[in-house]
Amino acid sequence: MKEDTKNLYVAILMSILIIFAVNHFFAPKQLENQVNAENEVSVASPLVENVEPQAVVKEEADESERIDIRTPSVKGSVRLKGARFDSLELTKYKQTLDEGSEDVRLLAPVSSEQPYFAEFGFLSAGDGIAPDSETLWHAKQGQLTPSTPLVLEWDNGQGLKFLREISIDEHYLMKIVDTVENTKDKSVVLYPYGRINRVYDLKNIQRSVVHEGITGVIDGSSKEIKLSDIKEGEPKTFKAENAWLGFSDRYWFTAFILEGNKENDLTLSKVGENRFQVDYRGYPLTVGPNSKASHTVQFFAGAKEIKLLDRYTKQSKIQKFDLAVDFGWYYFLTKPFFYILDFLYKMIGNMGWAILLFAALLRLAMFPIANKSFESMSKMRKIQPKIQDIQQKYKDDKVLLQQRTMELYKKEKINPASGCLPMFIQIPIFFSLYKVLNIAIEIRHAPFVGWVKDLSAPDPLTISTWSHIPLPGVLDIGVWPILMGLTMWIQQKLNPAPANKDQARMFAMLPFIFTLMLGHFAVGLVIYWTLSNILSILQQKAIMYKNGVK
């Protein structure tokens, strides 16, 4: 281990390739095997016809009467026909950074280009007993707000009255309480159900380290299932008492939330070309003669605000609701990193400066370890002429060459392995920060200074932008990646050069390779790495000066 810099670069490069390769080739298959192996049950029953995977959704113009939804975080409406949630916009988030950009649209009606809706109700063995997608509900007031719940009513004319109370908080969580009043002289058995149905543009789903597809927690077990794992006519099924399940995008998601001590049937299915559905059939609800019974379910539709999801986990006791955010393998680092960045952001007021301060604090925390590593590298640089003499003298005897080299290290009190510890620490830190910048909605559209308007996106000021020279995408990189590559090159020059000329040429290319590779990463990550390199250079120069190394 003669070149600590070589070890660092190779380890990071190989780790990046391994992580991406595992995510690309292995993760979907492992998840599919996990789903198939667990909780395989049959839900074939006439009672679930309305939510079977083969359910047909009519593609027709929607002119039904609606009730508005208004909160500080969302706006939209509930369609009275079927009591369907199919129109919702997130008012705190814009689709793009362009002036006048529209709010992010989450739910959309069947008549839209990409329908996305949820509905809840009851199933029964007899036609017309329970409300369905075509039932026209009567609303008792005209708007759903955090202070005014929406009450819907429907009488089936056969002795059953259905009352639905929908409440919503100031954010994205709705509570749906269905009450059935039975005026008949015999009991009625109903099965609660709910479904979220969505059409995807599969071509635009990016393959990345952020999961996009079906996500949830079923009886305490986290599930992330790729859409490509769901085949038409081959639904995946589970049984669970407590669960939440829905569709997850990079920054938004929807889910129904079930709680209780009775079992529910859950189904994930592909119900048509690019159309997917998650649904549940609840435990039987028996409504006795001249009595009433109720069923409660919660529905989340909104942004993945990490602190809000944590609050729902604790206050609303929704199991592991924070796992709607794909924290990745380094959860134990990724989540604390987010909270540190969020704290620094609130203290400074700018996420870019928060990232820079975070980089400085990390370097400070690693100072003793890095100091030891740089001390060793400085000593190695100082004895480089002696090492070259040994290499020249014993070039034909590798065993003796290794022996004499280790004797020299021992004589000079140098541990060539001392550079490995900072390397191993840096790798999980790098990937954890990379994950935070990709998943945290709090960093989406967060500006820095100058031309950087979105720290979660690549640097927009690319070579083509300021030089007007058209370049292939891989070569068209921004100013910050170029600065990062330059600092990496300077740092490399401070370390002992490989004696082998081929190795020297290869490692001389690493700053250029990393510049191209990270040129299309989130610019916030590149800014972090640039400052980290600068601080390393300063620390290493100070140690070299201390040890008399030119």
Image (cartoon, grey):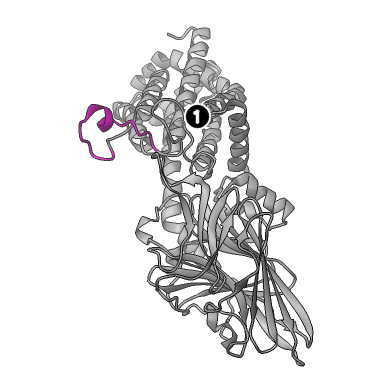
Q: Is residue 33 visible?
A: yes
Q: Residue at x 41, y 57 (%)?
A: 25
From the top left corner, tell me how far across and down residue 8 is, in percent: 46, 32
Please provide the residue range marked out in magenta.
458-474
Q: Is residue 39 visible?
A: no
Quarter of the image where one finds residue 3: top left
Out of 230 and 149, give the one closest to the viewer: 149
Q: Is residue 334 left or right of residue 465?
A: right
From the top left corner, tell me how far across and down residue 344 is, in percent: 60, 29
From the top left corner, tell me how far across and down residue 550 is, in percent: 42, 8
Quarter of the image where one finds residue 471: top left
Q: Is residue 17 left or right of residue 330?
A: left
Verify whether residue 326 appears in magenta.
no
Under tag 1, what secondary structure? helix
Residue type at numbered disc 1: Gly
Q: Which residue is mark 1?
A: 352
